[in-house]
Image (cartoon, coloured by chain):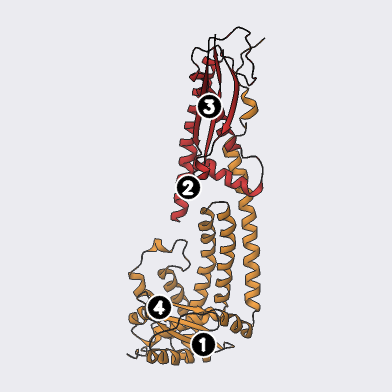
Amino acid sequence: MGNLITFLVLLVLGYVIGGYLERRHYASIRQREGEIVSLPSIMLKKPISSNEPSNYKLVTGNVVISVDYFKKFMASLVNLFGGSIEAYETLLDRARREAILRMKEDAKGASEIVNIRLETSSISTNSQNSIGAIEIMAYGTAIYL
Amino acid sequence: MYQAKLPDESVNIPTTHPLVGLIKYTSIMGIFLIVLYFVLILSIDIIASNITPVQEKKIAKTLSFDTMGDSKKSLYLESISKKINKCANLPYGVNIRYIKQKEPNAFAVMGGTIYVTSGLLDMLDSENELAFVVGHEVGHFKNKDHLKQMGYGFVLSIISSIISNGDDYSMQSLFGFAQSKYSQKAEFNADKTGLDLLVCSYGNASDASKLFKKMDKDSSDWEYFGSSHPSFKDRIKSIENRIKENHYDISTKPLPLKKI
């Protein structure tokens, strides 16, 4: 009985607070993406502009977002049957966009960012009690004209 | 020509509400587990009812339980169980073991062995009370509850290991809850058999519910919600109803307990 209550409290906590934080994060991502959309960021090795750059800079953005209890529970349920874990998909989406945003914010004043790469690192999976977090790093070369 | 574009959110963000997924998957899992649970419980009931005493002894040999205590008390207990067993017509003899333990308790295990704790003996005032306790445990043997209970424990462990793989310890307690209904029914039945055996071997039903009345004082009702045993109040009621229905004699003075 005590277990059940603990579980339900954690589930509701994860759903309500985790959901609220996710909505807030998305709102922030959308707003910042709109502000910074004009900065070209591509994965090509060569710049779009043919002008000779005045400076280059390695720009990075990294993010670690933890899963909430609700998402974890959903994942463990889907884990029994197979199928896409949609609860984690939004997490990945947020992490990827946030990492790119941070990288772009690191490139203030640049005319473009080229050769962007995305990588996942793993702090949490190596720890003994895996806490379940998504870690994404985006990096590229900012070009200043 | 480069044109700035915002990400298309319909591609990577799932459109279904997270709660829809939760309801979908928990209901699939729930239905599967409930079906599995009932199938297993049913098969345990069938197996337990069909196990012969010889088979039971064989299985009991593979399990070992600690036996200890003093022999004088054991002998006294043994003499009571013999009286009870004459009426019970069990296909095997019943052994009684005495355990030094404060917690008042008595339980029946495979192979016809009943364990009684010193805490329980200390609470007793008359031999009738003790005979009812022994009768209750013999009732479990008659109804094959000890085998069923073992089987149910096995089923629960299977189901909880399925669930714990999914990291969800809540369902374990849910099934424990479902289990309690069955086991409470078994306790009521064992009480009835115990009462009948007491009347059969002692000629009266005096003091049948006295022990429960004493134990009821130390407990509160909410403890029994979802528990394997029904509340003492309900058990006392059920015993007294049966005494009335069958016109059992409760006016005879109960036999005193031998103080050893």
Q: Which chain is red?
A: A
What is the number of the mark on residue A26?
Answer: none
Q: Would you identify the image quadrant in which residue A84 lies?
A: top right
Mark 2 → mark 1, Cα distance in angstroms:
46 Å
Query: Horizontal and vertical percent for residue B172?
Result: 53, 57
Q: Distance from label 1 to label 4 (Cα)? A: 23 Å
* Disc on res. B94: 1
Q: Colour of chain B?
A: orange
Q: Is residue B170 shown above or below A94?
A: below
Q: Are marks 3 and 1 on the same chain?
A: no
Disc 1 is placed on an element classified as loop
Task: Identify the image quadrant of the C terminus of chain A.
Answer: top right
**The disc label shown at residue B209, or none:** 4
Q: Residue furthest top?
A: A51
Q: Are marks 3 and 1 in contact (CB under 8 Å)?
A: no
Residue B246 shows up from this direction: no
Q: Quadrant of the N terminus of chain A?
A: bottom left
* Dot 4 alpha-carbon crowd within 10 angstroms: few under 14, some 14 to 19, many 20 or more: many
The answer to whether the residues at label 2 and label 1 have Cβ atoms under 8 Å apart is no
Q: Which residue is mark 3?
A: A99
Distance (Cα) linking label 3 and label 2 = 33 Å
Q: Amino acid at mark 4?
A: Ser
- For the residue pair A66 and B57, the one nearer the viewer reads as A66
